[in-house]
Amino acid sequence: MYELVQASEKCYYINCPAKIGVYAADSENVYLVDSGNDKDAGRKVRQILDKNGWRLTAILNTHSNADHIGGNKYLQEQTGCKIYSGGIEAAFTKHPVLEPSFLYGGYPCKDLRHKFLMAQESGVTDFSDESFPEEIEIIPLPGHFFDMVGFRMPDGVVFLADCVSSRETLDKYAVSFIYDVDAYLKTLDRVEKMEAAIFVPAHAKASADVRELIRCNRDKVHEVAERILSICREPVCFERILQEVFTGYGLTMNFEQYVLVGSTVRSYLSWMKDTGKLSAEFCDNMLLWKRV
């Protein structure tokens, strides 16, 4: 874990739970793609940089989930590096309580205010700032989270953030977190047509060809949607839908899984209502969902 892997002449990634990209702009200055899940991850990254004689110029955040920005604060305090982000992701990075608040749909209890869902705050510079390295292409990858992006480096390496999960992750957890299902599927379609020297997803193996992995992720989305539709043969409330999803996939509910899977199931319900596959009605002061 935390092994530095060379992907191309100028690009590397640190093999950890959420892969951290490294772009060596020259022999001394490097940019990170994300920073890991906490201060300890940041410390390990700092050790790798020091060992290679690299100076951290900036961190490029793909999105604001805690496992991608958790090392921001430590690395920024230690090195004075800039942290680039944009859109809603920048707001979540500056005010990380927004993540558990959004997931829960209200003020999060202490069980949700921990490092896995709430990173420490860090200062942010917008992608539009003139100091952002012009040789790096920002690739919009919405769907998994609000304004998630990937990055294409000058030598053709593409960091894909969380737009695909590994087959092992899909098999184990079944319901991968998705904020906007329609946008997510469109992102998969877009990435499927891309070419790169090598793709580096945060939660799957680096590969020059991710088309099969994209198909697996797309198929899983439609599988989950069909399961939800089958649960909604008769009018049913959200909590019962969520219970059936957990039971059907053999998942174990706790506070963290309740908000992550629960938020995702709500996104599926919205998507299928907007596309005419589900109807919603209020009965006895309860919102009920039914297959059309």
Image (tube, rainbow, N blue to C red):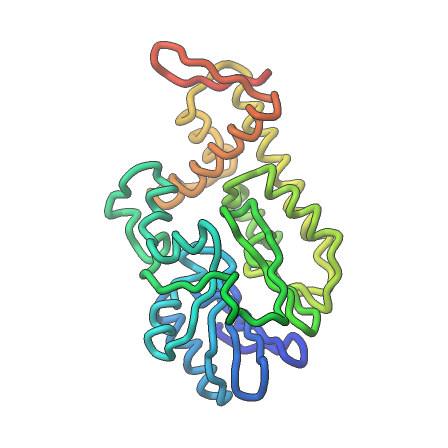
Give percent across and percent down for residue 16. Answer: 49, 68
Task: Report the front residue among 130 and 7.
Answer: 130
Q: Please state which of residues 289 and 119 is positioned toward the viewer in this rendering.
A: 119
Give the answer, above or below, for where 207 lies relative to 259.
below
Residue 239 located left or right of residue 7: left
Question: Does residue 259 lie above or below 207 as drawn?
Answer: above
**As rendered, which of 50 and 5 lies closer to the eye?**
50
- The residue sitting at 38% across, 40% down in the picture is 259
Counting from the top left corner in percent of width and height, residue 81 is at 41, 75
Q: Residue furthest left?
A: 110
Q: Is residue 60 above or below residue 104?
A: below
Give the residue drawn at x 52%, y 61%. 128
Q: Residue at x 37, y 73 (%)?
A: 76
Q: Position of residue 57 (x, y in %)?
A: 47, 78
Q: Position of residue 109 (x, y in %)?
A: 25, 43
Quarter holding the C terminus is top right
Which residue is outermost to the top?
284
Q: Is residue 158 left or right of residue 246?
A: right
Identify the image quadrant of residue 253: top left
Residue at x 67% of width, y 77% of height: 8
